[in-house]
Image (cartoon, coloured by chain):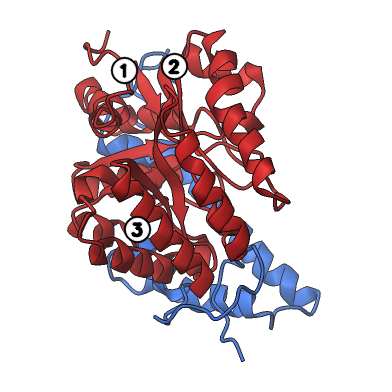
Amino acid sequence: MSTSNPDHTDRTTPAPPGNAALIDVGFLPVRAKLLEVAAFLDRVERHGVADDFRCKALRAAAHVLVDGEAERARRILEALSDPSLEPEAVSTGKAAFGAWQIRD
Amino acid sequence: MRYIEPHGHMVSRTTDDYEAMVTAGCQAVCEPAFWAGFDRGSVDGFRDYFRQLTEYEPARAAKYLLPHYCWLCINPKESEDLALAADVLAMIPEYLDRPNVLGIGEIGLNRNTRNELRVLEQHVELAVTQAQLILVHTPHLEDKLKGTRLILDVLRAHPGVDASRVIVDHVEEHTLRLVLDAGFWAGITLYPDSKSSPARAVDMIEMCGGERLWMNSACDWGVSDPLAVPKTALEMRRRGHSAERVDQLLFRNPHQFLSQCPKFRVAPGSAS
């Protein structure tokens, strides 16, 4: 076993916990998810459904990722949320959609 | 490691899941009443379901040495039908004295409608008059923020509600502080897609401190993972959180809240 590998990829003992593990463990799964977002946006354009309200909401929310401000997860959730305050008169179905759409 | 699964819909799971949970260190599982995936046709459908939660399911869990508790209500997804809700609300007291019933839940909202709100208010009144703990479901996805605000308004408006006896579940980054700042307990649900991942849950703990907070898998018949809670322990340890801290979040916090019901008898002991 190498003892000089700085990225811990061949460790046989547990990596020290803490900040380094955030990236060692977290980077590849998040890289994969970012590529899924990119491929999804390409896919819906290629199939002509990019104007769906959910796709629009996703593109708008994605700007939060690179605006340099903190609490990105909270702000994306808020961007996708129904901002109204009054209860709905009737239910429009059991399931939510994941992004808010202005109702007529 | 030991943990409590404070929210699992075990009627939807196989016995293999019980074995896996106990092997992972589960000390107790709590099962709120929920939607079956279809609307039940009458109050008798709920009567059968409550028998399942209070008779059959604890016996099934006992085969794996796992204490099983439950909560009773008509789920918000079925609360549009006010007549059915009234029948179920009238029947619930028949079951509240059963030895594994912890309180009223999971009540709350689904699509934030007036009927759902009315039934939520009736459930809160029932819980207060019967001196029961309350477990609240907050809506999904784009409806969660608005629904959480409406739910908190209902809870705060009732003079008999003791915030320390209410947990508002399924919080995410945009609703966690609303719940904690109002004095209630908060639950983070660990779902692969539609709620929080283990990593995001630990983020929230790091940002909010972990007081009055529990985590659950809410495993049911949908996309869910009955081992999501112990997997979150792994995420905590990877980030350098101590075993003591993990025990606080995964065992002692839910134990503290649930022990407000005298029927919850799980030895507090110490982590082995």
Identify residue type, mark 1: Arg
Q: Image point 36% across, 22% down: which residue?
A: B3
Q: Residue B67 carries which label?
A: 2
Determine the CA span between mark 1 and mark 2: 9 Å
Image quadrant occupied by the C terminus of chain A = bottom right
Q: Is mark 1 on a helix, strand or loop?
A: loop
Give the residue at x 81% y 74%: A47
The reply to whether residue B143 is visible in this rendering is: yes
Q: Which of the 4 image quadrants contains residue B6?
A: top left
Q: Assign a secondary structure to mark 2.
A: loop
Q: In this view, does B65 lie to the left or right of B208?
A: right
Q: Which chain carries label 1?
A: B
Labels 1 and 2 in the same subunit: yes
Q: Which amino acid does label 3 sit on?
A: Glu
Residue B173 has which mark? 3
Q: Looking at the image, is A87 positioned above or below residue B197?
A: below
Q: Mark 2 lies on which chain?
A: B
The residue type indicated by label 2 comes to Pro
Q: Mark 1 points at which residue?
A: B265
